[in-house]
Image (spheres, rainbow, N blue to C red):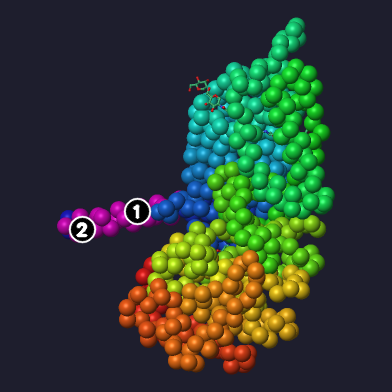
Amino acid sequence: MKQHFFRALPFLLLLFILLQANADLDSDKQALLQFANAIPHGRKLNWTASSPICTSWVGITCSKNPTRVIALRLPGTGLFGPIPANTLGKLDALTALSLRSNRLSGNLPSDVLILPSLHTINLQSNNLSGDLPSSLSPQLSVVDLSFNAFTGEIPPEITNLTHLTILNLQNNSFLGSIPDLRQTRLKQLNLSYNHLNGSIPSGIQNFSVSSFLGNPLLCGKPLNLCSSISPSPPPSPSILPPSPREKSKKKLSLGIIIAIAVGGTLMLSILLLALILCCFKKKQSEDGGPSVKGKGVRTDKPEDFSSGVQSAEKNRLVYFEGCSHSFDLEDLLKASAEVLGKGSCGTTYKAIMEDGTTVVVKRLKEVVAEKREFEQQMENVQRVGQHPNVIPLRAYYYSKDEKLLIYDYITGGNFSLLLHEGGRQALDWASRVKISLGVAKGIAHIHSAGGGRFIHGNIKSSNVLLTQDLQGCISEFGLTPLIRTPAVPPRSAGYRAPEVMKTRKPTQKSDIYSFGVLLLEMLTGKSPIQSPRREDVFDLPRWVQSVVREEWTAEVFDEELLRDGNIEEELVEMLKIALACVDRMPDGRPTMDEVVRMIEEVRPSDSENPPSS
Ligand SMILES: *[C@@H]1O[C@H](CO)[C@@H](O)[C@H](O)[C@H]1NC(C)=O
Ligand SMILES: *[C@@H]1O[C@H](CO)[C@@H](O)[C@H](O)[C@H]1NC(C)=O
Ligand SMILES: *[C@@H]1O[C@H](CO)[C@@H](O)[C@H](O)[C@H]1NC(C)=O
Ligand SMILES: *[C@@H]1O[C@H](CO)[C@@H](O)[C@H](O)[C@H]1NC(C)=O
Ligand SMILES: *[C@@H]1O[C@H](CO)[C@@H](O)[C@H](O)[C@H]1NC(C)=O
Ligand SMILES: *[C@@H]1O[C@H](CO)[C@@H](O)[C@H](O)[C@H]1NC(C)=O
Ligand SMILES: *[C@@H]1O[C@H](CO)[C@@H](O)[C@H](O)[C@H]1NC(C)=O
């Protein structure tokens, strides 16, 4: 009996631990359901009691085990009205909460900021009001309550937050004096546009003027001296510490690139003007000169413009469900940007946000679709894009002058670069088959979705992005119907099926042709676009067919591949698939499902146990 008990002990213990864990997760779930029930929201939350909270609820992050909810992020979800008390306050393992860019109003319940593990809170761009609760979690590090309607004093308890790194309280109605902040870790501070008075505490005097704008009763370094007796000359630039603004100059670039490119369009020109004006002003104020200091800094006009524009536009970044990003258009325009490529649909940038989030932003040009049609198509793209081999669309932005699409950033680069600009050696046969198979599956998924009414329309190697472990993912799905077909054949002409040259109407069959060209490109290492500069077309299928007809089959293959011994048979099999796809008659081409099956047969071992997983 005793023995039995001891044998059962570990099991009982485990059971106990599991029950305990479930109880916690269950109580988190109850609290979240209460929250969702009590708060109206514009976008549907797919939180149902029956589905697993950690894996299928949008906006939720669980701990690794997973026994608790540790983050709740619902930015731009159309949440409306007061935050219900006694709901979020029960999530006592929560470390991060983002409800930014919603329409929350009323008081912030006192049980939120005191959550013991809470580290990051983003509630900016709502309409929250009332006094801030004075009980604060000692773990708080990032506090962003900007662009709300909070009143009252900034609670002095904030001085005890030793981990505080970012404090943004701008554009509220906080009163009274600034608590004596002396946190050494504080990296970002913005108290602008409140009703603060008194002198700026010495611990934060090394922040720049732009942290304190629009508080006319505030004085002391870096603003005017407090004593009204004799205004001494402002410190020379060399004494002034580097302002945070200076660091962020580079980060304005996406906005600026966009603004410059758009040129005449109103919204962004104003934005640009405002940015230039405020940078210029900033520079002036740093350059010193008593007269500049005296009048320049407090003129709020340009800021009004830019922030007005931004606030009007902010909520128009449309997120899809399941997007865990929490930035808005403003952040996007401030992000540092790098051009990844220019294609027939527009320019693609890599944008790195201030918080380190990296996304891909595609700026569409020549969009002919009307707003409703565009939105409808975005819904389609998002729905159909739910496949491991299709790059998911996360959000988009539509205005008259500007259409932006936001995708995940994929780290492995694109197939075209790897094939043609070095790195080809790294792409051995197994990797090339794996990538091709992935792309084929992605396209097959697109073709089978929506009852077969979708086409890709722009398949080429530069639209195949690779993950770190060389999974091929197809990008740019669903954009061709939105864009005006160019009169001159674009760079992708080498991938175009012969019938599309005439009809200008891509079909699923023409997608298969393009995929066949991609396979030939992979096999031969030759690009169907001969010279990027001259934009002339090299008819890769015709070249391969002519070589093969003369029975020099081995001549067509990439030399790099011929080094991998023992694969000739597989190469020839793959070549057959490719040639079937580039049949000049659309009806002669296989379907994408057939192509997937055939590629799987070329290397059966690979498709059944992919080496990566
Ligand atoms: C913000 O809330 C106040 C009441 O607290 C209300 O009067 C005001 O209209 C709201 N503003 C917006 C933009 O919703
Ligand atoms: C900060 O913490 C100390 C000790 O924990 C306490 O004595 C003091 O009252 C706190 N200050 C505020 C403003 O809460
Ligand atoms: C600052 O504002 C508070 C609240 O409005 C007021 O009580 C206080 O007297 C003001 N202090 C100064 C120095 O103006
Ligand atoms: C201000 O000085 C403190 C130390 O005195 C430092 O930790 C902080 O990073 C400085 N802030 C800026 C913006 O330079
Ligand atoms: C603080 O916020 C104001 C208003 O949005 C903005 O103009 C200013 O540039 C910001 N300053 C810093 C340091 O971020
Ligand atoms: C921030 O506050 C200033 C001053 O009240 C105002 O002019 C500006 O429009 C506000 N910015 C936003 C984005 O609300
Ligand atoms: C909720 O949405 C997310 C993201 O779109 C998805 O991953 C999840 O499966 C959905 N859950 C349910 C129960 O539909």
Expressed as whole percent of the image width and height from the top left, the position of residue 87 reads 59, 46
Q: The N terminus appears in which quarter of the rendering?
A: bottom left
Q: Which mark is residue 7?
A: 2
- Relative to 147, is 456 above or below? below
Instruction: Look at the numbered disc 2 and give the secondary structure of its residue.
Output: helix
Query: Residue 383 lies in what quarter of the image?
Result: bottom right
Evaluate if marks 1 and 2 touch, with contact meaning CB atoms under 8 Å apart: no
Q: How many marks?
A: 2
Query: Residue 592 lies in what quarter of the image?
Result: bottom right
Q: To which residue does mark 1 refer? A: 16
What residue do we see at 70% from left, 47% from top?
255
Prevailing SS of the magenta stretch: helix
Residue 503 visible from this viewpoint: yes
First of labels 1, 2 by sequence position: 2
Query: Residue 149 lies in what quarter of the image?
Result: top right
Q: Is residue 466 left or right of residue 108?
A: left
What residue do we see at 41% from left, 75% from top?
559
Q: Nearer the viewer, residue 212 or 282?
A: 282
- Magenta stretch: give its range: 3-24
- For label 2, count other residues whose C-alpha is less than 10 Å away and answer few (under 14), some (14-19) or many (20+): few
Expressed as whole percent of the image width and height from the top left, the position of residue 182 reads 55, 22
Expressed as whole percent of the image width and height from the top left, the position of residue 366 reads 76, 65
**Spatial CA span between label 1 and label 2:** 15 Å
- Relative to 234, is 195 above or below? below
Q: Residue flagged by tag 2: what amino acid is it?
A: Arg
Q: Residue flagged by tag 1: what amino acid is it?
A: Phe
What residue do we see at 69% from left, 50% from top?
257
- Magenta segment: does it hold 126? no
Check the image and name the residue furthest to the top.
229
Instruction: Look at the numbered disc 1 and give the secondary structure of its residue.
Output: helix
